[in-house]
Amino acid sequence: MEIAVIWIPADIEPSEPAVARCLRHLRRHSYRFAGIMRAPWETVEQSMIDGEVDVVVIADFAHLPPDRSPRIELASATGDDADGGQPAPDTQQH
């Protein structure tokens, strides 16, 4: 069972709606709940690096700092990239 924490940035008030949303997510995925973190992102990041936390659950994507690390991005499958919406030639499906 994966260990999960809820991360709510310190400036999010009231925090209860965000916590409730995250708790529902935890229950749906059967994560082992390790607590709520209100620390800076760097502290959360270090917990992941140290292997203390497997999953960080957030209530809103906007809560994440844009310069966070580790950073994972999903390539758009719709092809609406900034280069005019055309996928690169080597990524086209045949």
Image (tube, rainbow, N blue to C red):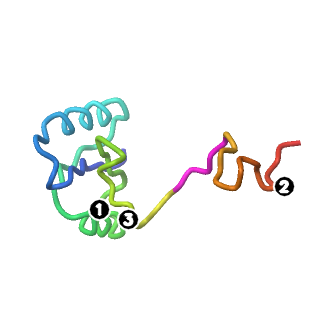
Pointer 1 with pointer 2, Cβ within 8 A: no
Query: Disc 1 designates what residue?
Result: 52
Q: Amino acid at mark 2?
A: Pro
Q: Is 41 on the left-hand or right-hand side of 16?
A: right
Q: Earlier in the sequence, mark 1 or mark 2?
A: 1
Q: Image quarter for residue 17?
A: top left
Instruction: Give the secondary structure at mark 3.
Output: loop
Kindly state the secondary structure of the residue where label 1 is placed: loop
Q: Which amino acid type is marked by label 1?
A: Glu
Name the residue at the right extreme: 94
Stretch in magenta: 73-77
**Separation of disc 3 and disc 1 at Cα?**
18 Å
Q: Can you say whether 45 is above or below 28 in the image?
A: below
User: What x and y, as percent, mark residue 64?
Assistant: 33, 55
Task: Name the residue beneath numbered marker 3.
Answer: 68
Please, what secondary structure does the residue beneath circle 2 have? Answer: helix
* Circle nearer the N terminus (3, 2): 3
**Mark 1 or mark 3, which is nearer the start of the sequence?**
1
Report the residue at 30% width, 69% height from top.
46
Q: Which residue is mark 2?
A: 89
Residue nearest the observer in this picture, 79 or 29:
79
Quadrant position of the C terminus in the picture: top right
Closer to the camera, 49 or 20?
Answer: 20
The quadrant of the image that shows the N terminus is top left
